[in-house]
Amino acid sequence: MRASSVCRALARMIALVSLSIGGAACSRNPAPDGWLAPARQTQSDPYGAWIVVTKLQDSSTVGGEFLGVARDSVFVLLDRGEVVTVATAEVRQARVAFFDADWQALAAYTGLVSVGALSNGFVMLLSLPATLIAGSLATVSYSKEPIVDLSYEGEWSSIRKYARFPGALPDPLPRTLPVKRRR
């Protein structure tokens, strides 16, 4: 009877740790579902990353494809094909997502491996917590990998490589451009 109460307490602790690590720490990708390419296809995707710019004055946001950065402005292509310009001096924060991490698959794999750890008998008391903690930490880390945050004091050149036009914007930049189709 004493061993079963220890196992129940351990199971509760493991569930609590896993849920708190996994649920609270995973980054929410700001791009719409199906818009970003998977990690393996990112290099061949001709479109820019997804950017969400938060303005300094009124905290309003502008989100869309990251076209590029000029000396004093950031250019964003909205879903409807319209190009919007935001002065870099007006930006409080920018969040760029450059590929779809698909961290949910890693979380599911962690759960599946954890179920397999249940068959380890007494060793399960060590293998199950290790599997859940390591899997949760890996999932959290991978969910944050494709996301870069830039504060208004940040250097825009650090995220330039994620733009559709990383070198320089075309002159003149059209006011409308084709929009990427979702997968």
Image: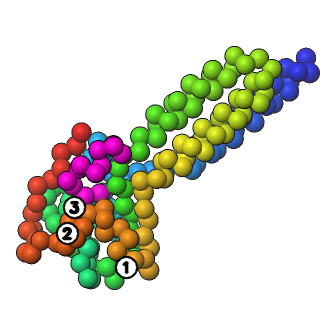
Query: Do tag 2 and tag 1 residues touch (Cβ < 8 Å)?
Result: no
Amino acid type shown at disc 3: Arg
> Residue 19: in sight, yes or no?
no
Residue position marked by numbered label 1 in the rendering? 57
In the structure shown, which secondary structural element does the residue marked by tag 3 occupy?
A: loop
Please state the total of marks drawn on the protein image: 3
Query: Which type of secondary structure does the marked residue at label 1 adopt?
Result: loop
Residue located beneath label 2 in the image: 84
Q: Locate residue 13 relative to residue 20 in the image: left or right.
A: right
Question: Magenta region: which residues?
Answer: 38-49
At a point 11% along the width and 55% down the height, the residue shown is: 178
Task: Place residue 48 in its image quadrant.
Answer: bottom left
Relative depth, front residue between 48 and 152: 48
Examine the structure image and report whether residue 124 is included in the region drawn in magenta. no
Note whether 124 is above or below 30 in the view shown: above
Residue 61 percent across, percent down from the top left: 33, 66
Q: Which mark is residue 164?
A: 3
